[in-house]
Image: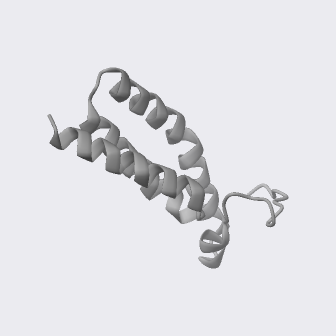
Amino acid sequence: MENFNIDKDTANFSLDILASMGDPDYTAEIIADILKETPKDLQAMRAGIEKNEPQVVARITHKLKSSVVIIEAVSLVSLLTGIESVAKSANQGL
């Protein structure tokens, strides 16, 4: 696994949960998966917004939230939770 210098005072995420598992290969795999899938998920979310499909937006935000919680991206989890809530409310109004 490649070493990254992360300033823990300014980072918007933490790898502490992954590091505590003691498996650098697993950590690298999880991070690679997040980096690979997130752009696709954001594109799918945008398409759901453009097509007025709140159920798609809710599903994608839930998936993203589940992915980033392991890296403790608290601000992002909070944002995604809000988006998911709005999308679910909009879906109930259809």
Q: Residue furthest top?
A: 51
Left or right of residue 82, residue 17 in this image:
right
List x then y, in percent, for residue 5: 85, 58
| Image coordinates for residue 30, horizontal then vertical, percent | 56, 56
In the displayed structure, would residue 14 be above or below residue 65? Answer: below
* Residue at screen point 16% across, 43% down: 92
Q: From what the image shows, is residue 19 above or below residue 47?
A: below
Asked which quadrant contains residue 1, the reply is bottom right
Q: Quadrant of residue 27?
A: bottom right
Task: Please name the colour scheme applied to the rendered image.
Answer: one colour
Report the label total: 0
Residue 15 position, x and y percent, is 66, 66
Q: Nearer the viewer, residue 32 or 9?
A: 9
Q: Residue at x 61, y 69 (%)?
A: 18
- x, y percentage for residue 2? 78, 55
- In the figure, 76 relative to 40: above or below? below
- Residue at screen point 63% across, 78% down: 20
Q: Say which residue appears at 50% left-offset and 57% top-offset.
A: 78
Quadrant location, the C terminus: top left
In screen coordinates, is 8 left or right of 23? right
